[in-house]
Amino acid sequence: MATREFTAEENCKRVDVFLSEKTGETRSRIKKLADEGAVKIDGKAAKASDEVKAGRKVLAEFPEAVPCVAVAEDIPIDIIYQDEDLAVVNKPQGMTVHAGAGCTSGTLVNALLASLDRLSGVGGVMRPGIVHRIDKDTSGLLVVAKNDKAHVSLSKQIADKTCHRKYYALLEGNVKAEKGRIATDIGRNPADRLKMAVLPAGRGKIAITDYEVAARFGGDYTLCRFILQTGRTHQIRVHAKYMGHPVVGDPVYGYKKQKFALNGQLLHAYSLSFVHPSTGKEMTFFAPLPDYFSAVLEKLGRTYGADTEHIMADLLQK
């Protein structure tokens, strides 16, 4: 058990907010610790919603990281960078990030265990090293923590919105505005709990997505650049549907009839920026579009007379 103690320098309305800011842990994890009696204010057990007044001592007991029990599997993966603290991986479409219901092998975690010398234990026994996720059928960049210090730092950057994640997606139809921001609540779809949906304000979690048009193909398709300001489940895919322009190939939120033979949505995490946990240096990585994504753009270029070569060359410049 690792005990961490802090003295509040000013009043804070909630102890989970206070500890999340101090430790980089999520508020949900702090709440779970509080529910288990592992959070105390001046020696007394506290609820996540309890107020913290200036001068009070706040203590949290964190369970020791449990050794990873996921099994290493010899699965080829594209590690574009690694050092003593972290690795950056270009995940292929069709690979689940970590084990879950109905999926216990063939995941990115299984591959990482075989390819890297170590992974952080903060994520638990089935999610070692995993700081953030992208959907199974979304391709692109993820940063993976190799030790707990790096994990906490990177998680805090995501929570503080200082870790920048950019995506390209091909959308159905003609997106009229050249750029914009979508800010809505997102939560479980009341009619289908396996899906996410835009919900009325206060009914879900706030989700903010910025977008900019990168290329147009007649009035039928639009290639957009997306920048996540939050990281909700299926956020870009749900917001694209909310715009009235779902992601091409999306089997959950897209059109039932698809023109292209695809194995999932044309959504790719092409750029990832963060501050290195040890050196303090800002690092930015890029991953080119996968071949199947490029092939669709090239086909559209021929169909609509678009300068696909110029478009492709310009994609990683922004």
Image (cartoon, rainbow, N blue to C red):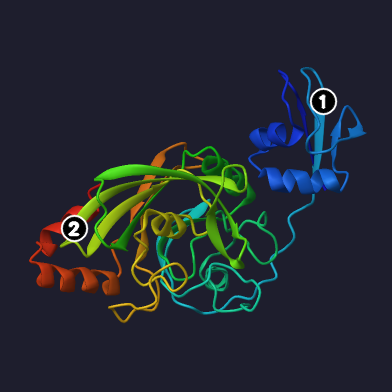
Q: Secondary structure at mark 2?
A: strand
Res 73 seen here: yes
Tell me, for residue 57, which label it has, or none. Answer: 1
Res 2 seen here: no
Provide residue 105's location: percent of width, then percent of height.
59, 79
Tell me, for residue 48, which label it has, or none. Answer: none
Q: Secondary structure at mark 1?
A: strand
Label 2, on which residue?
A: 216
Q: Tell me: residue 27, above or below residue 262.
A: above
Q: Quadrant of residue 245?
A: bottom left
Q: Quadrant of residue 2?
A: top right
Q: Tell me: residue 92, above or below residue 283.
A: below
Circle 1: residue type: Lys
Tell me which residue sits at (17%, 74%) in the image.
299
Tell me which residue sits at (63%, 77%) in the image.
104
N-term-proximal mark, 1 vs 2 = 1
Tell me which residue sits at (78%, 20%) in the image.
53
Circle 2: residue type: Arg
Image-based side of 237 in relation to 13, left or right: left
Front position in the image: 191 or 2: 191
